[in-house]
Image: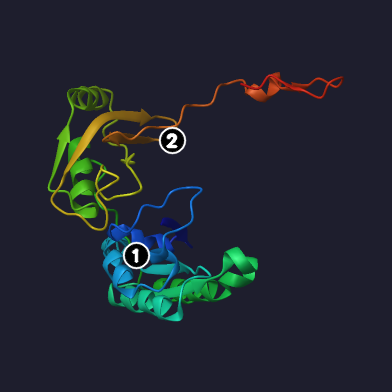
Amino acid sequence: MEKSEAGGEEICLKFNTPTKSRFHGPDVVPGKPLADEYTQENLELLRKGFANLRRHIENVNKVGIQAIVAINAFSSDTAAELELVRQLSREAGAYDAVPTHLWAKGGAGAVELAKSVERCCSKSKQNSIFHVLYDHNLPIKDKIEVIAKEFYRAGSVSFSKEAEQKIEQFTRNGWDKMPICMAKTQYSFSADPALKNAPEGFDLPIRDIRASLGAGFVYPLCGAMQTLPGLPTRPYFYDIDIDAEIGDILGLF
């Protein structure tokens, strides 16, 4: 499930079949066929798994933005399943929920979605009430706790000794007024990828905190979350070549 801004006023949530898995459905393993629960109609599992999407919609609405659910309609999705998602999304507070078929039809498969976004943007220009979740002037810890408790529904936030030291250092350096970008698993509202659906009251462990000074934000690392390595100043492609005589590629690692 991804989020993207639309016209600076609305947010669209892309949503597809894995919503069923948000309620402890069978594991989805790369390279293996999907379980029958995901390829056959299962309204009960879909309804239970919808709690995850409902929270995303609530979070979007919480900052004064209207949500549009873009349903990534799979060939195995039935009309009843698509209609159930549309119904539940609107009941949860979404402006609209629109099936899309981009994977099969390209841009033509998202025309109705685009029209819905256009209608929503036109309507919202008159009464947009967007507001940020927290005051950037709050201490780093307070901003993290607001995100954890308001968006993730955590009951508490714990900080490692290293994270505590980083917070003190960042505050001394004047970096405490920067916004927060949480580095956390995408598979759960918690830091535990196995804790699915819409958990509440859990502890969110902050292992470390780092700063991206160029981009202008601080990012806490939740649980075992890892980050991608930075790119070198001199790209490695400069050292990649082809041995024209034998056709081997050189410089790969």
The residue where tag 2 is placed is 215
Q: Where's residue 59, x and y in %?
A: 28, 60
User: Which residue occupies the extreme right position in the image?
Assistant: 245
Query: From where the camera sits, is residue 201 visible?
Result: yes
Q: In this view, does 132 lie above or below 211?
A: below
Query: From where the camera sits, is residue 11 visible?
Result: no
Give amino acid for label 2. Answer: Ala
Tell me where residue 123 sits by quadrant: bottom left
Give the mark nearest the N terminus, 2 or 1.
Answer: 1
Q: In this view, does 101 lie above or below 230?
A: below
Q: Where's residue 19, x and y in %?
A: 36, 62
Tell me where residue 51 sits by quadrant: bottom left
Q: Which residue is pictured at 32% across the width and 41% down the height?
A: 184
The residue where tag 1 is placed is 65
Q: Where's residue 38, x and y in %?
A: 41, 64
Give amino acid for label 1. Answer: Ile
Marks 2 and 1 in Cβ contact (< 8 Å): no
- Give the side of residue 54 with respect to residue 107, left or right: left
Tell me where residue 193 sits by quadrant: top left
Mark 2 and mark 1: Cα distance apart in space = 24 Å
- Which quadrant is home to the C terminus? top right
For the residue labelled by badge 2, is the local secondary structure a helix, a strand or a loop? loop
Q: Which residue is pictured at 22% across the width and 34% down the height?
A: 206
